[in-house]
Image: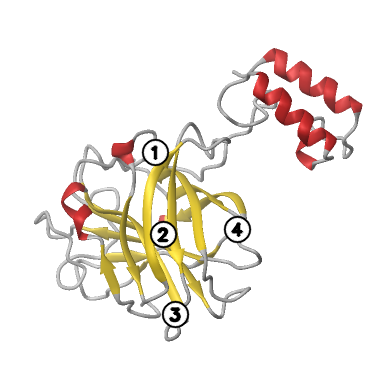
Amino acid sequence: MRQFLPVVIIASAFASATLGQVTVPNECESASSKLLPLSAYFGGVASFGTEIVSPPSALYSGSALRAWANFRRDNFFRLAGFTIGVNLIAPPSLAVPPDASFFAFALDVPDLTGKRLLLRVVLREDDDGDGIIDPVETDDEWESSQVLTGPGRVMVNMPLTSFVDANPLVGNDTRQFTSTPRMGINISFETRQDLPGGIIEFPVSLLVDHVGFFPSAQSLPTPCVGDFDRSGAVNAADIFEFINAWFLGETRADVNASGLVDAADIFSFLNAWFAGCP
């Protein structure tokens, strides 16, 4: 069962646009593919939203989803959060392999000055097949364990068997992620007073990519050395980015993994740069 039932502010303007617009798996490559801002709870979120962006360094490939929330001080609640996702999505937009074992997505969380966010995923099934997901009376709702995030880039892999029934005695109480006719997918980020660093009271921006159901655990792509700025292209900008990192002695400039940032890294980088990326 959930630890709390948050008061929510529903972003209802997006509700009618969810079915058939967003695809899962979702590689966040176009504006129409973005996961939507669904809800925020309690008084600690002034505003929140999502947009497709092309970050200087790709998170998984190409573009990514930027999810943001303007957390603010609230003198009453010491808990706040926001949820992104899709309220209702059906095949063929909802593609779940018959041997799906994981719900996964790539996540990039910035340095939040020592503060942390909790991550939780909720999967909802249309058990009665009526085209409406009602987790209060007729349809199952499955909840992941809570994950303490970042900072940094990770691939979040959640075994489907680890999702627990969040509303027992509602729906058929059977996981049917690979066969349900429709599904809702919610990804929530929470700040709490009792987390490391305390509650967040400033704007936060995250990157999400490669969201979906997969037969095996996913991993972040191995970066191409020549594409030093992770733009997806090998060009002169990579040389300048490498030189700056090398002069600063940054760990990422140790491209030959020798443990030192020295002249040998320059030759290793240039060889990789001229070779290009596959």
**Rendered residue at 43%/42% (across/down):** 215
**Rendered residue at 82%/33% (across/down):** 246
Provide the residue designation for mark 3.
74
Q: Is residue 167 left or right of residue 243?
A: left
Based on the displayed image, in which of its 4 quarters is residue 52 positioned? top left
- Precedes in sequence: disc 4 or disc 3: 3
- Precedes in sequence: disc 3 or disc 2: 3
Indicate the amino acid at tag 2: Thr
Around disc 4, counting alpha carbons within 10 Å, would you say few (fewer than 14), some (14 to 19), or many (20 or more)?
Answer: some
Q: Is residue 105 left or right of residue 229?
A: left
- Precedes in sequence: disc 1 or disc 4: 1
Secondary structure, mark 1, is loop
> Which one is in front in this view, the residue at disc 4 or the one at disc 2?
4
**Residue nearer the viewer, 136 or 171:** 136
Provide the residue designation for mark 1.
28
> Which one is in front in this view, the residue at disc 3 or the one at disc 2?
3
Provide the residue designation for mark 4.
150
> Which one is in front in this view, the residue at disc 2 or the one at disc 1?
1
Indicate the amino acid at tag 3: Asp
Indicate the amino acid at tag 1: Cys
Provide the residue designation for mark 2.
161
Q: CA distance from mark 3 to mark 1?
A: 33 Å
Q: Dots 4 and 3: beta carbons under 8 Å? A: no
Q: Dots 3 and 1: beta carbons under 8 Å? A: no
Label total for image:
4
> What x and y, as percent, mark residue 221?
58, 35
Q: CA distance from mark 1 to mark 4?
A: 21 Å
The C terminus: image quadrant: top right
